[in-house]
Amino acid sequence: MRVNFFIVSMLLLFVGTVFAQDYVRIKNRNTINGDVYGIHIENTSVEAGTIQPNWWSAQWVFEKIPGSKYYKIRNRWKKNGRDDYYLHLVKGKLEASKLVRPNLKWAQWALEKVRGTPYYRIRNRYHLMHYIWIRIDKGIELTAGKVSPFEKLAHWELEGFNEKAATVAPKQKKETTSVSTARKNNTKKSNVSATPTKKKKRKKMTKIRVKLLKLVCEVSDDEGINNNADMSHFKMEAKLFQKNCKEDNVNSLIGKGIVYNWKGRPDKEVAEGDVIYGGKKDYVDLLLDESCGTKYSVKFDASAVERDTSSADEKAHNSKTLIDTNAEGTHQIRLVSSDFTYRVEFEISKIDYYENKK
């Protein structure tokens, strides 16, 4: 009886160990046609679509790379009954298949938390600007590429993910000949030396910073008291383009972001000479992809809305595009309507930084 009890106990322990594995469903933040889309390999290739809770093809294991912030993402289902399928990039295309070499960087992914949300962006380690997202402009396609950080189709819920309990990827064998191996091969120690470890260079990258410096009212000619304008909205946005970086044979929008976004509740009365904004905190950093060259352009968009109770609201919009050779420095544009004029001063600068590899 004791022997049987021992065997049953060991079997229960084994089963508990097997099912302690954390399996994760990767679900998109956005809904498409009212449906939640998840990443799976149910069909011939990796894709995004509606998934069932019991599909192993839609369950993934996040294997932490020891000593780094990166993960390998392995599917639970051995589709051919033999091999593990990992997410990786092949010539820029997202695929799920067996890895020829287990330590390839294009099969490693960083999880970047979307600030203020439970969602993540999934970035490739080798192609630093490539994030997993769903394109819907030409059908529905799961891909990896350059995409705005505000794009919800690139935000993912990792259902069941436990960062602290993530599976650790197995250690990879070094590809250099060691002294012990040389001895086994009857090679003299004096002729074989251990390959020195090379210190990895951190990749130098560049940010284009677009900062709002000042927003000043130059003209106020409303019907209100003292001709003050009742302003309800100011918005400034920056977009970064690179002409030599093409996808589908068109110029690429590398990134965009909100520099300043103010909405009045209630509306703000503004008189001539008032400085609406004169701070230092409102800016956006846009990452320059130097693999596409150093030529770039920045488009700065500004708009303002005045609430008018007696007639239609007054609106003004203006934009300015600056090429890399004359982009850096201080610039200004004006927002003009029949009731107001505002001077918008902004600054563009380049900031070098290095990727922080843990």
Image (cartoon, grey):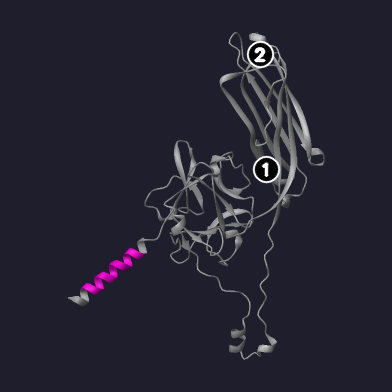
Question: Residue 228: which disc?
Answer: 2
Question: Residue 286: which disc?
Answer: 1
Q: Residue furthest left?
A: 1
**Toward which corner of the image does residue 77 lie, by quadrant?**
bottom left
Label 1 crowd (10 A; few <14 / some 14-19 / many >=20): many
Q: Which residues are magenta?
A: 5-17
Residue at (44% x, 44% y) in the render = 50
- The residue lying toward the viewer, choosing from 56 and 310, is 310
Residue 304 point in image, percent of width and height: 66, 23
**Toward which corner of the image does residue 187 lie, by quadrant?**
bottom right
Please, what is the three-letter code of the amino acid marked with disc 1? Leu
On screen, 351 above or below 57? above
Label 2 crowd (10 A; few <14 / some 14-19 / many >=20): some
Mark 1, secondary structure of its residue: strand
Residue at (55% x, 58% y) in the render = 70
Q: Would residue 22 be found to the left or right of residue 315 on screen? A: left
